[in-house]
Image (cartoon, rainbow, N blue to C red):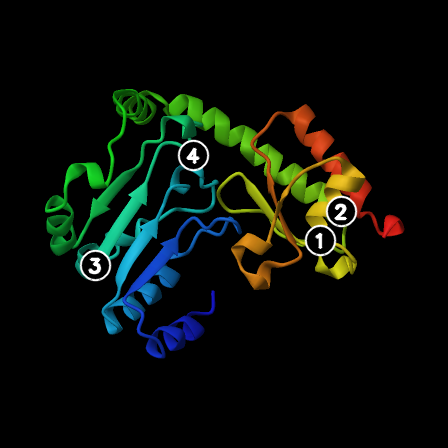
Amino acid sequence: MDLAALDTAVAESACKALVLVNPHNPTGRVHTRAELAEIGAIARRHDLLVISDEIHAELTYDSHRHIPFASLSPDAARRTVTLTSATKAFNLAAIRCGLTHYGPDRLLALRDAQPPDLYGAVSPLGVVATEAAWRDGDAWQRDLLSVLDRNRRRVHQVLSTRLPQVRQHIPEATYLAWFDTRPLGLTEPPVERVLKEGNVLLDGGSPFGPDADGFLRLNFATSHDVLEDILAGLVQALRPERI
């Protein structure tokens, strides 16, 4: 993370809020305490509201540690709105239940002053499912992380050995692999190439900004057999002799 560039960009703009995604989607980075502390210093220096999306926090792998941004200091707590949910770590996206923790009292007061139907409401099923996941799901989640850990290493191994020109890294969190196909010199978008030649549909990088053109995002939260099919199709489409 280029923190100096972030500081300069904030200083040169009328920015009032910073959206922090940690763990990061799509890169899988888990920011260190030192990085978060510097972001906190930037937020304090420019009096920024920090909106911290921490929905992938429970999908952090061993040797890395997720640190809630609001836990850094009293100042960070006062200026942070934290967003989280059980939906990613426990495969509960269909219940559409998320949580918002308001650090700034003024924002909580503004929210409470609005009609409740402005924001909508979660369903009773969503509340019960979220409580059950966080109360009783530890053993299940440990097993899940074991599978995801194996899968992320398998993706890295296949890309490193079969497609060494593709730039990639092992994600520190999430179930998403993020890799750069630009060194291959493709003459068509990689999403189209992989779908046409490998019969696999991945997410392209373009929705994440112009700097991400040429990247692909792979969701490896699946079974061993399905993952092997995905990787075989990816190699089939991107191996150098086919380009």
Q: Amino acid at mark 3?
A: Arg
Place residue 134 in its image quadrant: top left
Estimate the spatial distance between the alpha carbons at disc 4 and disc 1, rounded to whole Å: 28 Å
> SS class of the residue under badge 2?
helix
As helix, strand or loop, the secondary structure at mark 1 comes to: loop
Kindly report which numbered mark, 3 or 1, lies closer to the viewer in this rendering. 1
Badge 3: residue crowd in 10 Å (few <14, some 14–19, many ≥20)? many
Dot 4 alpha-carbon crowd within 10 angstroms: few under 14, some 14 to 19, many 20 or more:
some
| Residue under label 3 | 79
Q: Does the residue at mark 1 contact the one at mark 2 (Cβ under 8 Å)?
A: yes
Q: CA distance from mark 3 to mark 1?
A: 41 Å
Apparent side of residue 78 relative to residue 122 in the rendered image (left or right): left
Q: Nearer the viewer, mark 4 or mark 1?
A: 1
**Mark 3 vs 2: CB contact within 8 A:** no
Between discs 4 and 2, the one toward the N terminus: 4
Q: Earlier in the sequence, mark 4 or mark 3?
A: 3
- Seen from the viewer's position, the closer of residues 195 and 18 is 195
Q: Is residue 90 visible?
A: no
Image location of residue 101, percent across then percent down: 22, 44
- Residue positioned 24% across, 40% down in the render: 119
Please name which of the two marks, 3 or 2, marks the residue nearer to the observer.
Answer: 2
Q: Report the residue marked by disc 1.
A: 189
Whether residue 216 is situated above or below residue 17 in the rendered picture:
above
* Residue at the spot 34% in from the left edge and 67% down from the top edge: 38
Q: Earlier in the sequence, mark 3 or mark 1?
A: 3
Task: State the separation of the CA atoms marked 3 and 2.
Answer: 44 Å
Which amino acid type is marked by label 2?
A: Arg
Q: Position of residue 20 (x, y in %)?
A: 37, 56
Of mark 4 and mark 1, the one earlier in the sequence is 4
Q: Which numbered disc covers residue 193?
A: 2
